[in-house]
């Protein structure tokens, strides 16, 4: 009813029959981080978000991102965890002040599986584990997404790729069914008194899927490969916690017998063992990687066809690109005796209506998506599952888009912050999400640890969010106040409005929204389109195949794009460090 009312209001406004009303996102002297770094009392030195926004409105330029990059380095190397939390709040302030990240809601995950399929589990970071599942015919037919972007542990950047990777590769640590980090290829570890040196023991007699020996030297090779900036791994930043040698290699060594891995960190890292359960830290076999044609310039070439060597529960035995993948049990997996399912047949599709039809026809046992229109009828279905995640669904504005051409950094920031205020997240969460999603007003999701025993999103003596009631940067729900503030921000950027509060034809705003296929993504795009249209903003929608979408977003070929991030570990730095200038996940183009 709300959506019909909103559209009707827009129609009548355009006819001019209503009265006007508010309607339904480095210089030394200006470097506030430098002041913070040298302060004795961190809580007083780091301003609240409200103050930070005001003092940086004219100075936080997304094109000059050196202060932010320096701040992230400080977070990564801080040993004072109270000060570290203050730095993270400051980084969040800077991100939100740009307006380039428009949060919509905090994620949960939905999926379905047949009642006779058991022991499938996932963690709060979106990884789904099938290797210990049980199925009547020892075959599992599932759907995770369309063609995966990469199945190399160091280069798989999407959630569906990661799910494939964690079932075909194994690392030193993994997650159990309760979401706890547990040893996998490791038998245990010790850490030095100063927290800098980890000595990790490997299980004996580990082998690759081809039967050859797997040892600690494989981790030395794999980690240096993933961390090497010349290889272009988007997760290379995760290795920044490890100290480096003079030649730029990581301070990671293998014992002569191959049973022990010694790792020296640059600073103590409370979540280091959690990192070891992340796919980027999984090993790959050097001889296989370097046997591929052009491997130096195309490091993922070795695993783009079936038959590549793995070390996890399954190998890829067949791959019909754009259609299907078949995974076969790896008898050399070190826990092979616990793997009951012999074959996993993967349907490659993001067409949720097609996928749902296949599930209902019995052609699929597990699906990772359902059409939006089906959710209400599925809420009481025991085969329909809703799980909590640490993540945020948001919209990215490319800061170098022609949309902001001719604007000062302050004007462009004002435009983007105005767009954020125009969105009715309550409608999106209730009518599109439908599974208890929480409307978002900042990038960091609820439940994130502050790194020293508390909740990052909880106001405390050291920090108060600018909107204390909502613990964020604005009211995420529709309000007349948001609409009025949005107009004021746009006016400050040079836009004019008519007597009905609609953009004047003299100063139009139009842009294209890039998204991939799926009824939920389409519905969100249409909701945004309608919300922007309320004040006369023209947003067109460009929906493309997922592989095209990922490439276009990665290359920055868009004005505004669907985006989202599921945390890799429970620390806010993971939601912040992806926005450094050199990060492969910096879709907004900060510092570029």
Image (spheres, rainbow, N blue to C red):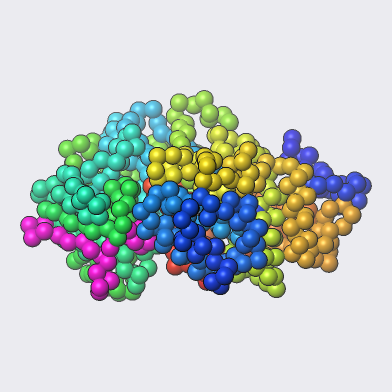
Q: Position of residue 103 (x, y in %)?
A: 58, 49
State the image quarter where residue 468 is shown. Answer: top right
Residue projecting furthest to the left: 257
Q: Position of residue 490 (x, y in %)?
A: 75, 59
504 or 286: nearer the viewer: 504
The reply, left or right, for residue 509 in relation to residue 217 is: right
Q: Main secondary structure of the magenta part?
A: loop
State the image quarter where residue 30 is shown. Answer: bottom right
The reply, left or right, for residue 195 in relation to residue 2 is: left
306 or 398: nearer the viewer: 398
In the rendered structure, does residue 136 fall within the stretch colored magenta? no
Q: Position of residue 113 (x, y in %)?
A: 41, 34
Q: Indicate whether 385 appears above or below 196.
A: above
Q: Which residue shows up at 66% across the image and 58% down it?
A: 54
The magenta span reads 235-258
Q: Which residue shows up at 74% across the image and 64% down it?
A: 493
Q: Which residue shows up at 27% across the image and 66% down it?
A: 244
Q: Which residue shows up at 45% across the image and 35% down it?
A: 387
Report whether residue 501 is seen. Answer: yes
Report whether residue 305 is seen. Answer: no
Quadrant, the N terminus: top right
The reply, left or right, for residue 568 in relation to residue 167 is: right
The reply, left or right, for residue 28 in relation to residue 317 is: right
State the image quarter where residue 408 is shown. Answer: bottom right
Q: Position of residue 70 (x, y in %)?
A: 45, 65
In the rendered structure, does residue 255 fall within the stretch colored magenta? yes
């Amino acid at each position: 009813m709300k959506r019909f009312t909103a559209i009707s209001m827009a129609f009548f406004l355009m006819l001019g029959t209503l009265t006007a009303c508010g309607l339904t996102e480095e210089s030394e002297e200006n470097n506030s981080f430098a002041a913070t770094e040298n302060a004795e009392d961190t809580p007083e030195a780091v301003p609240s978000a409200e103050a930070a926004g005001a003092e940086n409105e004219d100075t936080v330029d997304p094109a000059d991102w050196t202060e932010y990059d320096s701040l992230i380095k400080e977070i990564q190397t801080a040993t004072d965890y109270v000060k570290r939390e203050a730095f993270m709040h400051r980084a969040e302030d800077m991100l939100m002040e740009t307006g380039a990240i428009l949060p919509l809601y905090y994620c949960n995950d939905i999926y379905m599986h047949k009642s006779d399929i058991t022991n499938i589990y996932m963690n709060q970071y979106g990884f789904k584990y099938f290797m210990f599942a049980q199925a009547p015919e020892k075959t599992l037919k599932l759907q995770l997404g369309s063609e995966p972007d990469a199945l190399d542990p160091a280069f798989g950047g999407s959630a569906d790729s990661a799910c494939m990777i964690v079932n075909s590769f194994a690392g030193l640590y993994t997650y159990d069914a309760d979401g706890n980090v547990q040893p996998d290829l490791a038998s245990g570890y010790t850490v030095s008194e100063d927290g800098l040196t980890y000595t990790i023991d490997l299980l004996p007699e580990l082998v690759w899927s081809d039967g050859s020996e797997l040892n600690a030297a494989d981790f030395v090779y794999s980690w240096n490969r993933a961390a090497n900036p010349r290889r272009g791994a988007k997760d290379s930043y995760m290795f920044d916690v490890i100290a480096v040698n003079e030649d730029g290699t990581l301070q990671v060594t293998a014992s002569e017998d191959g049973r022990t891995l010694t790792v020296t960190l640059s600073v103590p890292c409370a979540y280091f063992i959690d990192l070891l359960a992340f796919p980027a830290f999984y090993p790959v076999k050097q001889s296989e990687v370097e046997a591929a044609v052009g491997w130096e310039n195309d490091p993922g070439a070795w695993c783009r066809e079936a038959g590549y060597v793995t070390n996890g529960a399954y190998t890829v035995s067949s791959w019909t690109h754009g259609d299907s993948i078949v995974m076969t049990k790896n008898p050399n997996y070190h826990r092979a005796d616990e793997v009951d399912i012999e074959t996993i047949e993967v349907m490659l599709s993001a067409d949720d209506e097609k996928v749902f039809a296949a599930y209902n026809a019995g052609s699929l046992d597990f699906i990772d998506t359902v059409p939006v229109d089906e959710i209400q009828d599925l809420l009481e279905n025991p085969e329909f599952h809703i799980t909590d995640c640490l993540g945020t669904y948001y919209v990215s504005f490319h800061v170098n888009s022609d949309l902001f051409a001719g604007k000062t950094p302050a004007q462009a920031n004002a435009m983007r912050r105005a767009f954020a205020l125009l969105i009715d997240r309550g409608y999106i969460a209730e009518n599109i999400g439908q599974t208890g999603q929480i409307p978002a007003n900042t990038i960091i999701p609820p439940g994130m640890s502050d790194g020293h025993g508390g909740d990052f999103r909880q106001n405390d003596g050291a920090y108060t969010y600018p909107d204390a009631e909502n613990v964020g940067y604005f009211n995420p729900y529709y309000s007349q106040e948001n609409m009025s503030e949005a107009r004021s921000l746009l006016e400050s950027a040079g836009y004019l409005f008519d007597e009905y509060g609609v953009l004047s034809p003299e100063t139009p705003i139009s842009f294209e929204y890039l998204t991939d296929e799926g009824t939920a993504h389409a519905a969100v795009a249409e909701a945004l389109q309608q919300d922007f249209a309320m004040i006369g903003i023209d947003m067109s929608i460009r929906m493309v195949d997922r592989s095209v979408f990922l490439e276009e977003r990665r290359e920055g070929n868009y004005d505004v794009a669907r985006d989202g991030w599921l945390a890799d570990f429970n620390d806010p730095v993971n939601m912040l460090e992806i926005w450094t200038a050199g990060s492969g996940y910096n879709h907004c183009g900060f510092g570029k």
